[in-house]
């Protein structure tokens, strides 16, 4: 029976230590939270600048809701597009130095809408093997041929590009890899895109707000500009709200508005969110103090951790993964930390490759130095005990 099969598949997740569970948090997004009746110190969120629960954003959302109400009422191309959406798109484009930006409801939708709008059957996509699931799904939806090159390896990408006879080519990469924290070699990727006449799409979900002058992101940090470049920034991480945007050449963005199905066939995001995002952009732009504090915490964690068997991956971003390897061991370590009041997620396949289960520590500007010391000391102790 279908249902019996499904139940057996669920049980199989348990035997392989792959079943996922959710915790319900009873307090706002912050390092110190109440979870399942316990006070915990969390290192889980992507709220890198500590803006998700910032009173200024909550206030902008309230004021926005008081004027615009709760919902948009229709898709953007029908009647669900409001003046504040225009204002937000213009601000985002200027902020990242692009001609135009298009605001999507989520980063997942930005990616799964943009890729099939750019390429299709007979075309080819060249994707870093560790790209985010939404980029993989976008590639599959497009029906273009998908080549996945070795992580962070421009030579492998170059070989794949050189042997391709596809009509149109699209290189796709995370800017900051979400489970590893390392940064893609963006300048080299753009050189290859130019040499092989390809688009270059960069998903900066974890760099926007964090990297570059004023938090303008990984592409600004690398000093790159080109009509070939399609920049995706998400707005639910460092920006602390929700949504995403795709920015680039004005004609490219116009094409996306015409063709991206995840933009066209969905209700417009609530305009009040756009008000909160405008407030967030102001805080990001003037957030050097937050970014400096965050960088100091990253340096502190890397100094305090003294691991022998587990491996702290090389990363200069707030994503600081500790590679453990075995699924069950990673889970056991996360559970031992939990028992000490420390909440760090264990990330297992299929989110990461087999045999690379890890703790994904993420730091935010809302943490303090003692929070980070507390985590580092607990990990040092646990590794010695395992
Ligand atoms: C989180 C994330 C997304 C998805 O963005 P959402 O706005 O959460 O849907 C896309 N790409 C990367 C690399 C991400 O980390």
Image: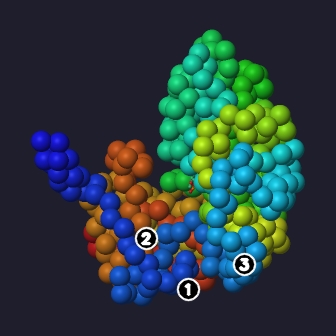
The residue at 12%/42% (across/down) is 1
Sequence-first tag of 2 and 1: 2
The residue at 55%/85% (across/down) is 370
Name the residue carrying label 3: 66
Residue 47, above or below 247:
below
Q: Are the two marked residues, 3 and 1, in contact with CB atoms closer than 8 angstroms?
A: no
Sequence-first tag of 2 and 3: 3
Instruction: Answer yes or no: is residue 25 visible.
Output: yes
Instruction: Answer yes or no: is residue 216 visible.
Output: no
Residue 380 in the image: state x and y as whole percent. 41, 74
The quadrant where residue 48 appears: bottom right
Residue 170 in the image: state x and y as whole percent. 66, 28
Residue 80 in the image: state x and y as whole percent. 70, 54
Q: Are the two marked residues, 2 and 1, in contact with CB atoms closer than 8 angstroms?
A: no
Name the residue carrying label 1: 370
- Residue neighbourhood size for the residue with mark 2, other residues' Cα within 10 Å, grouped as few (<14), some (14–19), many (≥20): many
């Amino acid at each position: 029976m279908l249902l019996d099969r499904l139940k057996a598949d669920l049980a199989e997740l348990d035997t392989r230590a792959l079943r996922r569970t959710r915790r319900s948090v009873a307090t706002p997004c912050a390092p110190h939270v109440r979870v399942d009746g316990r006070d915990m110190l969390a290192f889980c969120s992507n709220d890198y600048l500590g803006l998700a629960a910032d009173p200024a954003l909550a206030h902008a959302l309230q004021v926005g809701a008081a004027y615009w109400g709760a919902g948009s009422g229709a898709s953007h191309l029908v009647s669900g597009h409001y003046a504040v959406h225009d204002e937000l798109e213009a601000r985002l484009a200027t902020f990242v130095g692009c001609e135009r930006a298009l605001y999507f409801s989520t980063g997942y939708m930005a990616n799964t809408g943009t890729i099939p709008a750019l390429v299709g059957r007979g075309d080819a996509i060249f994707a870093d093997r560790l790209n985010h699931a939404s980029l993989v799904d976008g590639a599959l939806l497009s029906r273009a041929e998908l080549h996945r090159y070795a992580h962070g390896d421009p030579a492998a990408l170059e070989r794949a590009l050189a042997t391709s006879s596809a009509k149109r080519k699209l290189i796709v990469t995370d800017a900051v890899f979400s489970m590893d924290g390392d940064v893609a070699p963006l300048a080299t990727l753009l050189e290859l895109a130019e040499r092989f006449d390809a688009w270059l799409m960069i998903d900066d979900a974890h760099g926007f707000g964090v990297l570059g002058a004023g938090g303008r992101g990984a592409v600004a940090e690398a000093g790159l500009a080109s009509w070939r470049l399609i920049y995706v920034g998400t707005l639910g991480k460092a920006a602390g709200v929700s949504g995403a945007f795709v920015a680039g050449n004005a004609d490219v963005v116009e094409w996306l508005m015409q063709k991206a199905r995840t933009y066209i066939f969905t209700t417009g995001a609530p305009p009040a969110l756009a008000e909160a995002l405008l407030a967030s952009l102001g805080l990001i732009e003037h957030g050097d103090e937050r970014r400096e504090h965050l960088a100091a915490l990253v340096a502190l964690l890397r100094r305090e951790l003294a691991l022998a068997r587990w491996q702290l991956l090389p990363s200069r971003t707030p994503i600081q993964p500790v590679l453990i390897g075995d699924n069950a061991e990673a889970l056991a370590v996360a559970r031992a930390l939990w028992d000490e009041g420390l909440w760090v997620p264990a990330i297992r396949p299929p989110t990461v490759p087999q045999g690379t289960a890890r703790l994904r520590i993420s730091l935010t500007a809302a943490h303090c130095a003692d929070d980070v010391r507390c985590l580092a000391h607990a990990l040092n102790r646990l590794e010695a005990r395992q």
